[in-house]
Image (spheres, rainbow, N blue to C red):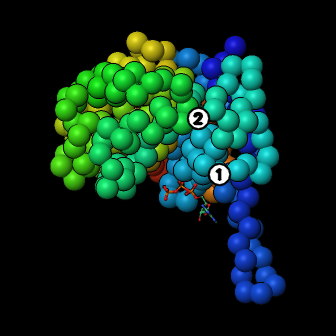
Amino acid sequence: MPLLEVTDLSKTFVNRRGLFKRETIEAVAPLSFSLEAGQTLAICGETGSGKTTVAKLLVGAEVPTTGVVKLGDEPLALHSAESCRSIRMIFQDPSTSLNPRVTVGRQLEEPLKLNTTLTAAQRQAKIEATLVRVGLLAEHADYYPHMISGGQKQRVALARALILGPKVLVCDEALAALDVSLRGQILNFLLDEQRKQQLGYVFVSHNMGIVQHISDYVLIMHHGQVVERGPTKEVFSNPQHEVTKRMLMAQNLWGN
Ligand SMILES: Nc1ncnc2c1ncn2[C@@H]1O[C@H](COP(=O)(O)OP(=O)(O)OP(=O)(O)O)[C@@H](O)[C@H]1O
């Protein structure tokens, strides 16, 4: 049985234009896919293709127009404790996703307070262990975000995503803001965690180099539709759709 099974997930936004006019945007046309434990599915596409909307639908940050997300054989209810614990998201820019006025420790404690029955001492121990797990120090719990570097902030974001022991991580351009060497370190960490914990990753990115390195399967989106899908190796070595070819060529990964 797949770890995550998505059936006919779609999102249509309705924007008001003036008093009487409405404009509908089909950001994601009905989309189905499944993800096995320990595997990575990449969702790629150019700007505005619907990638981020898919990521937000998976973690319940947007309400779907249609569709079901199942974790194992259970449909996930929006904002249920189970979905908050099991599917966690890492955003592109940790400097905007971390609260500048709250210490790292308190930001990590928040999901524990909301989703577990751990005592204060148990929460503290969990926070320190998780900071060490992502390559930081226990003392970083007392720091404010402005006191640490961009790479360390991304590790805090990882710690916050991992602290509840999720089964699926959704990474939306999570490495885009990092320089190449930090990106390599975080990528290796993600791959290591995946191997140890059998995590499933949904990796949203327009960086085809990273996608090639990290993913087993790939979906290419264009204007809300999936235009190409398959095992990453096959799609990258023999792209069929114009958009896939264009993205690979633009990043010197095909046809040169
Ligand atoms: N809250 C919203 N209200 C109205 N339209 C929206 C909303 N969020 C996204 N859209 C529209 O849905 C479409 C898909 O947007 P989305 O952000 O998912 O694309 P994307 O592929 O992630 O793009 P990018 O790489 O630029 O982040 C776009 O046309 C966008 O303008």
Q: Residue furthest bottom?
A: 19
Q: Residue at x 26, y 36 (%)?
A: 141
Res. 82 in view: yes
10 Å neighbourhood of mark 2: few (<14), some, or many (≥20)? many
Tell whether 79 sits left or right of 73: left
What residue is shown with label 1?
A: 62
Q: Amino acid at mark 2?
A: Cys
Q: Amino acid at mark 1?
A: Glu
What residue is shown with label 2?
A: 84
10 Å neighbourhood of mark 1: few (<14), some, or many (≥20)? some
Q: Is 34 in front, or is 78?
A: 78
CA gap, disc 1 and disc 2: 13 Å
Closer mark to the observer between disc 1 and disc 2: 2
Q: Is 12 in front, or is 136?
A: 136
Q: Position of residue 233 (x, y in %)?
A: 47, 26
Q: Residue at x 62, y 40 (%)?
A: 58
Q: Residue at x 43, y 46 (%)?
A: 91
Q: Are marks 1 and 2 in contact (CB under 8 Å)?
A: no
Classify mark 1 as within 8 Å of ligand 1 or not, answering yes or no: yes
Say above or below: 222 vs 24. above
Q: Position of residue 17 (x, y in %)?
A: 71, 82
Q: Position of residue 212 (x, y in %)?
A: 41, 32
Q: Secondary structure at mark 1?
A: loop
Q: Residue at x 59, y 19 (%)?
A: 36
Say above or below: 131 vs 63. above
Q: Is 151 in front, or is 182?
A: 151
Say above or below: 211 vs 242. above
Q: Split into 4 quadrants, where in the image is the C terminus? A: top left
